[in-house]
Amino acid sequence: MFIKRAFNITKDNIILAQPLVLYLVILSLTMAGLAQQGNKIYFIVFAIANILLSTAFFAGWCFMARKTVEHSKKEFDKPEEKSMASLALIKEFFPGVGEFFLSITFTTIIYTGLCALVLYLAYKAGLHFLPHSHINWDNLFAAKTPEQMHDFVNTLTFTQLKILNAWFLLMSGVTVLFTFLTMFWFPAVIYDSKNPFTAFWFNIVFLFKNFFGSIGILAFLFALNMFISALTVLLNINVILSIIGLVISFYFMTYCLVLIFLYYDEKRKA
C-alpha cells in the first residue's frame, strides 16, 4: 500500500525533484572547483561551504517532502487546483531551510561521524576475526570499470576470493544494519524534535514499533536500488540513454524520500 501510494505521490508531485536536480548540478560544479584547489586554506573553506550547502539542501528538501505528503491527503474540487497546489510546494523549500538548517546540520555531522565510527570498528573486527587475505587493496580500489574489476578478480586465488566475500558480507551487513537503525532519523527531526539526539530516540522507538514494516521498506528500497544501478550501467552505452538513466536516478531518489516520509507520517500516529 505505502509503496504504491508513494509512487503516485511522487508522480503527481514531481516538482519535489527540482531542488535535487539543482543541488546536484551546483554540487558537481563546486566539487570540481574543490578538486582543483591547491591552497589548503581555500580547500578547507570550499569543503565547509559544500557541507553547509548540502545540509541547507537537505533541510529544505526534507521539509518539502513533509509538505508533499500532507498535500497528498487534501481534497481538491478540480485537477487544475491540485496541480497548482503541487507546483506551490516549491515555496516550502526555503522556509524549511530557515527552520531546520541547524538541526539538519548537526544531525548530518553526528550521522556521518557515527557511520565512520561504526565502519571503522567493523574494519577492526574484520582484522581480528577474519584471516589475512594478502590482497593488494590498492589494486582493488584502483579498478574503476567492470573490466578492470574482472581482471583483478582473475588474479586472486580461491581462498582469497572467499576471504574477499567474507569482507564484503561483513561491511555490507554493518552498513545495512546502520542504515536500518537510522532510517527515520531525519523524518523524526522534521516531525518530532529538532534536537538530533531526541530525534534519534524517536527514530529508534518508531523502528521497533513498526519493525517488520520498516524491514520490508528497507529491503524493497535496497532491491530497487540494485535494479536501478544495473539499469543505469546498461543505459550508459550512449549519451541519450545515459540522460534517461540520470532522470530515472533522480526519480528514484525522490521516490525513496517520499516513501520514507509517507511511512513515518502515517505510522507515527498509530
Image (cartoon, rainbow, N blue to C red):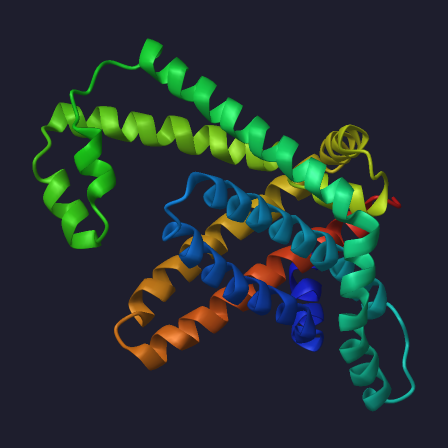
Residue 185 occupies which quadrant of the picture? Answer: top right
**Left or right position of 114 against 146:** right
Residue 16 location, x and y as percent? 68, 69
Quadrant of the drawing holding the N terminus: bottom right
Q: Does the image show residue 266?
A: no
Which residue is situated farthest in the top direction here? 128
Residue 61 location, x and y as percent? 70, 59
**Left or right position of 100 against 36:** right
Residue at figure coordinates x 42%, y 53% from the top left: 226
Residue at figure coordinates x 64%, y 40% from the top left: 183
Residue at figure coordinates x 78%, y 34% from the top left: 199
Circle count: 0
Residue 121 location, x and y as percent? 46, 18
Residue at figure coordinates x 16%, y 28% from the top left: 136
**Above or below, 178 relative to 152:** above
Residue 137 location, x and y as percent? 22, 30
